[in-house]
Amino acid sequence: MAKVLVVTSGKGGVGKTTTTAALGAALAKAGQSVVLVDFDVGLRNLDLVMGAERRVVFDLINVIQGDANLAQALIKDKRVDTLSLLPASQTRDKDALTPEGVAKVIADLSKKFDWVICDSPAGIERGAQMAMHHADMAVIVTNPEVSSVRDSDRIIGMLDSTTEKAKAGEKMEKFLLITRYDPQRAARGDMLGTDDVLEILSIPLLGIIPESADVLKASNVGAPVTIAEPDSAPARAYTEAARRLMGEKVEVTIPTERKGLFDWLFKRRVA
Amino acid sequence: MSGRSFLALTLTPETPLVDWLAALDHQIQRAVGFFAGKPVILDLSLMQADTPDLPHLLPALQERGIRVLGIEGGDRSWPAVADWAWPESPMGGRASGPVSIPEGEKNPTLAPTLVVEESVRSGQHIIWPDGDVVILGAVSSGAEVTAGGSVHIYGALRGRAIAGIGGNADSRIFTRNLAAELVAIDGFYATAEEMDAQCTGKPTQVMLAGETLVFKPLP
């Protein structure tokens, strides 16, 4: 039986879609069969980040409404053959997501894959609720700043009260993923520290992804960073996070700056 | 000028109105005096212009001693409500969860305590109009705990804690780490800016002395 994982945050722009793509690709590269489901109906992006935008024929809404079957809508990744994508519709809105339809799609996907990863839209409304409703576990993506932390806290509350698992009286597994962590700003102390974030949200830490130009570069060429730049610092952090999701014990490292003497001299000169 | 804050109950009538009023009567019978002196907001959002018996709704509530402070939803231009003295609903306000009407037979001196085993997250609102509330976790920024009695928080208080809402001036607020957005006892409140900075981040109790909130470090 598949694990249904929702990637969510409340706040927009923190890196949900990037994380969905990077974690999914890392799991697939480790041999797991993975499907990424874009729930951001009306503002889809996952197809772009996965480089599949020119291969979209049918989407999640088509499947829910019975206009297409799953096999027609699923897009197989060309680089990692255990990775698939179910895109969202760009022309519809989130009201087209019906609870029964979503339940059926998730149940069908669960039979075919090891991991069903749902990319939640920002906000706490219908789209986000539909994305989290059937999840077994959640990755909460948070930036180290106060507004993101508060929104994550709100989402954790919803995960514990509105989801199917919560209604059945079970506990949902929740993991915190801190993204866009800037070691330079952390050293200067003008960013919320990892300890503070963990203390406020009090859920287990899945990983810390450093802010990096590699992530943006990868998005722009339509590849998850774990495929495009597998040796970069963010890709390594995502790969370790994926191993933790699979139950491996890997210690979390806080990214620090590694600068050579040359960088240091150069920086002194500009400053 | 000074401020008091009250919890207003919201009544949302459903159709058919006759059945809804009968259900309300049944609840009032179980808890006599529950509505006495309490401000009530009447929410007409489920009503239509032609809902049967709508003209009698407001008089029927007033007959039962329910003081309607404001009316929301609906439309004052409906002919059915033309005879009503339509009090405008106060602006703003935050929604809280459903309030259950207490059973009448309960001994008022033995108010039950609500124990919350985990943290209260942003956006959540714990409301316990009778007794004390004990929170084993933290109360997050943007969360709110409202109690008829005292509020005990074993984690950090980063959100709002409101004690003694039924007029209980002896109730207190306790926390292991005071970082609150707002604390209130019996309607007297203090925002973060007005709190004693010496207690910030420390184990603290808040109590009411006359009309002033007093912050004391816990031993």
Image (spheres, coloured by chain):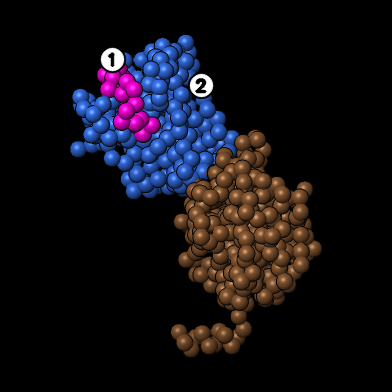
Residue name at image x 40 percent, y 45 percent: B181
Q: Is residue B15 above or below residue B3?
A: above
- Mark 1 closeness class: few <14, some 14–19, many ≥20 residues within 10 Å: few
Is A164 placed left or right of B49 in the picture? right
Is B20 placed left or right of B39 in the picture? right
Provide residue B210's location: percent of width, then percent of height.
Answer: 29, 29
The residue closer to the viewer here, A110 or B37, is A110
Provide residue A34's location: percent of width, then percent of height.
Answer: 73, 59
Task: Give the brown chain's letter.
Answer: A
Q: Quadrant of the N terminus of chain B?
A: top left
Residue name at image x 61 percent, y 59 percent: A59
Residue name at image x 57 percent, y 40 percent: A162
Mark toward the start of the polypeptide (1 vs 2) = 1
Q: Which residue is mark 2?
A: B112
Q: Amino acid at mark 2?
A: Pro
Report if residue A170 is visible in the image. yes
Query: Magenta segment range?
Result: B45-62
